[in-house]
Image: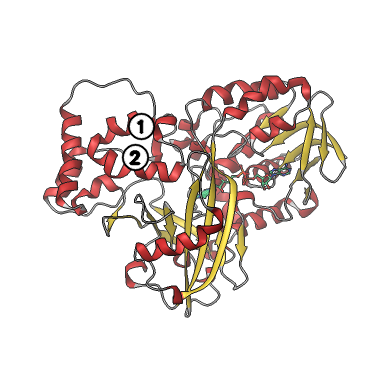
Amino acid sequence: MHHKYLIIGAGPTGMGAAYRLKELGETDFKIIEAHAHVGGLATTFRDEKGFLWDIGGHVQFSHYNYFDELMLKAIKKENWLNHQRESWVWMRNRFIPYPFQNNIKYLPKEDLWKALEGLISNASSSKKEELKNFEDWIFQSFGEGIANIFMKPYNYKVWAYPPSQMNYKWIGERVATVDLKRITENVIFDKEDRSWGPNNTFQFPLEGGTGQIWNNVADLIGKEYFSLNKRLTQLDPIKKRLFFQDGTEATYEYLLSTIPIDKLSSMCTKHIKEDISVTSRLKHSSSHIIGIGLKGRVTEELKTKCWMYFPENNCPFYRVTVFSNYSPNNVPDPEVYWSLMTETSESPEKLVNRDGLIEETIQGLLNTGLIQSRDQIVSKWHYTAEYGYPTPSLERDQVIRSVIPTLEQYDIYSRGRFGAWLYEVSNQDHSLMQGVEWANRIVLKIPEITFNYPSVANANLGRLV
Ligand SMILES: Cc1cc2nc3c(=O)[nH]c(=O)nc-3n(C[C@H](O)[C@H](O)[C@H](O)COP(=O)(O)OP(=O)(O)OC[C@H]3O[C@@H](n4cnc5c(N)ncnc54)[C@H](O)[C@@H]3O)c2cc1C
């Protein structure tokens, strides 16, 4: 097989590239995918009992007009459901609206005082230490109280690495920061304060979960451009030759890889292996998604909630999505069933008892009051994404910025959630646009924004495109 463009991986990045190539009149390409289905981490599965599960709560929001327009081509306007984001933190046996720091009035008095004391002492100190890592950023931004009560334990649970091992450059719009005046006003006037962030409202497909979007995008591209069930195992960058598990080979002029860059590096034949072996220093965490199908109707307390964060140790998960609230079609019959989807992280620094995780999750749901009894459960589903979150570790930027140019000397382009390893631009919209912008660069010589300038993309300048 020979194609001008070969794309490895049929997730949002690979499909963004393919869609754009076709739009530009370039049709000599193929998307190669290891699995029998398209969608990558944005796939939806139906379990044996008929419940739908995304790989973790996928929420649609966007920084790009191009992405929005494609979403409407993939799924008609009337088949999108629009939701008001309602996210909460569960701790100290109560729900606290997110963002946490704006709603500390909900904390028990001792915690409230610690939180306020930290904020006040930060504000009154003129000395700002130089920030070395994410933990320093947490303490400098939120003060000791909120750092110890919520930010440190919660972030360890999400990332599966201590914040001291992470950089803080990725933060941008992703973490709500502190407005002391607003926080004090909320405490004194007993105000609830929930409005924040880029994903205040979000949309979700009426049918088929998040995966439906990408199945439909694949149809727009054309099934003949996909080669499924084909796993890349080796790559010769000099001869521009790929080797697959099924014994076949392929050559290309330009290669777009969307698989984890550390895996790609390990597949390269010896010529450039040494130059790119530093990718083994990159850190990532795995994501365990446990879906729990329940009989009965969703409780009054959870009826309007989208997702909840769990910083405490009484449950293994850091986040739970009320997935049946996203679409009535996420359960076999909305009159009879509802569903919860949990996310638990794992890394060498935070091991998980994989065999016992479903049981620990159910116990966690009981401990946190999300379910009342095991008798409610009608379905249990477990999926592990070995590569779930690309960790913005201290060494990340240096590794990525040295390896990607080396690969590009051989016309190999590594993009996407784990291809570029940039968490700050690794959602579906960013990933799709990394693919689109790659095609624009190769065909039209237009520089890429999202990969090169994440903060520019996240400042909504992508809306100009
Ligand atoms: C828990 C979780 C929650 C998320 N929540 C959201 C959210 O709320 N909103 C949002 O927009 N995004 C969310 N995302 C991110 C979203 O899933 C990603 O943006 C997107 O899937 C990344 O696309 P990608 O194409 O870069 O990579 P992937 O989706 O990982 O696709 C890579 C593809 O490469 C294939 N592949 C791997 N190795 C090989 C090989 N050797 N040969 C051939 N093919 C191979 C894989 O099978 C896969 O299909 C979430 C992700 C996770 C894990």
Q: Is residue 58 above or below residue 414?
A: below
Residue type highlighted by circle 1: Glu
The residue sitting at 38% across, 66% down in the picture is: 366
Residue 357: x and y in percent read 51, 57
The quadrant the N terminus occupies is top right
What colouring method underlies this structural image? Answer: secondary structure
The residue at 23%/50% (across/down) is 103
Residue 358 screen position, x and y as percent: 51, 61
Percent x, y for residue 79?
55, 65
Q: Is residue 281 left or right of residue 256?
A: left
| Above or below 352: residue 129 | above
- How crowded pointer 1 is (Cα within 10 Å; few <14, some 14-19, many 20+) is rated as many
SS for dot 2: helix
**Relative to residue 148, is residue 250 drawn left or right?**
right
- Between the C-alphas of marks 1 and 2, the distance is 7 Å
Q: Tell me: 249 left or right of 160.
A: right
Q: Which of the 4 quarters of the picture holds residue 374?
A: bottom left
Determine crowd level at label 2: few under 14, some 14-19, many 20+ residues with C-alpha closer than 10 A.
Answer: many
Residue 464 at least partly seen = no
For marks 1 and 2, the one nearer the N-term is: 1
Frontmost residue, 458 versus 180: 180
Q: Which residue is labeled 2 in the image?
A: 152
In the image, is residue 256 above or below residue 109? above
Residue 120, horizontal then vertical, whole percent: 16, 34
Q: Is mark 1 within 8 Å of ligand 1?
A: no
- Let me know if residue 143 appears in the view: yes
Looking at the rendered structure, the kind of residue marked 2 is: Lys
Give the SS element for disc 1.
Answer: helix
Q: Are marks 1 and 2 in contact (CB under 8 Å)?
A: yes
| Residue toward you, 275 or 352 | 352
**Residue that label 1 marks:** 135
